[in-house]
Image: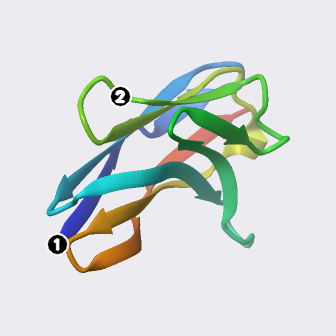
Amino acid sequence: QVHLLESGGGLVQAGGSLRLSCAVSGSIVSINAMGWYRQAPGKQRELVATITRGTTTYADSVKGRFTISRGNVKNTVSLQMNSLKPEDTAVYYCNADINVLTGRDNYWGQGTQVTVSS
């Protein structure tokens, strides 16, 4: 079994910063890519940022404000969020494309709430 555990969400004022972390645990062979998605109330889940072997991609709405990075601890990923805006309010989900013993699969964390007040 593979589990993704997110942490670091919370309430912050506009202009503030938060750092989200995600740790992958379980029987994995290797990780192909990791990323963060978010879903605001009444909206579809959208990509925020991904990292694949050091290559990063960002949604236009977060470029220059958010930074995704693999952690120093193996099988972790972080999302540093600066200059937060009320429109960043959403549940943030960690995602991982993982090779396991039986093949390749995609996994999601349970989500962590980020609320930015104006």
Neighbor class of circle 1 (other Cα within 10 Å; few <14, some 14-19, many 20+) is few
| Residue at image point 47% right, 28% down | 19
Callout 2 touching callout 1 (CB < 8 Å): no
Q: Position of residue 11 (x, y in %)?
A: 51, 35
Tell me if 111 is positioned left or right of 80 in this view.
Answer: left
- Mark 2 → mark 1, Cα distance in angstroms: 22 Å
Q: Which residue is mark 2?
A: 71
Q: Amino acid at mark 2?
A: Gly
- Judged left or right of residue 30, residue 10 is right
Look at 35% across and 28% down and name the residue there. Answer: 71
Determine crowd level at label 2: few under 14, some 14-19, many 20+ residues with C-alpha closer than 10 A.
some
Secondary structure found at label 2? loop
Is residue 110 shown to the viewer in this render? no
What residue appears at the point 83 percent right and 40 percent down from the top-left corner? 61
The reply, left or right, for residue 56 in relation to residue 18 is right
- Callout 1, which amino acid? Gln
Q: Is residue 34 above or below residue 44?
A: above
Residue shown at 30%/53% (left/top)? 30
Q: Secondary structure at mark 1?
A: loop
Where residue 102 sits in the image (x, y, percent)?
A: 24, 80
Q: Position of residue 117 (x, y in %)?
A: 67, 35
Q: Is residue 93 something that shows in the picture?
A: yes
Query: Which residue is labeled 1 in the image?
Result: 1
Disc number for residue 83? none
Q: Looking at the image, which residue sits at the far bottom?
A: 102
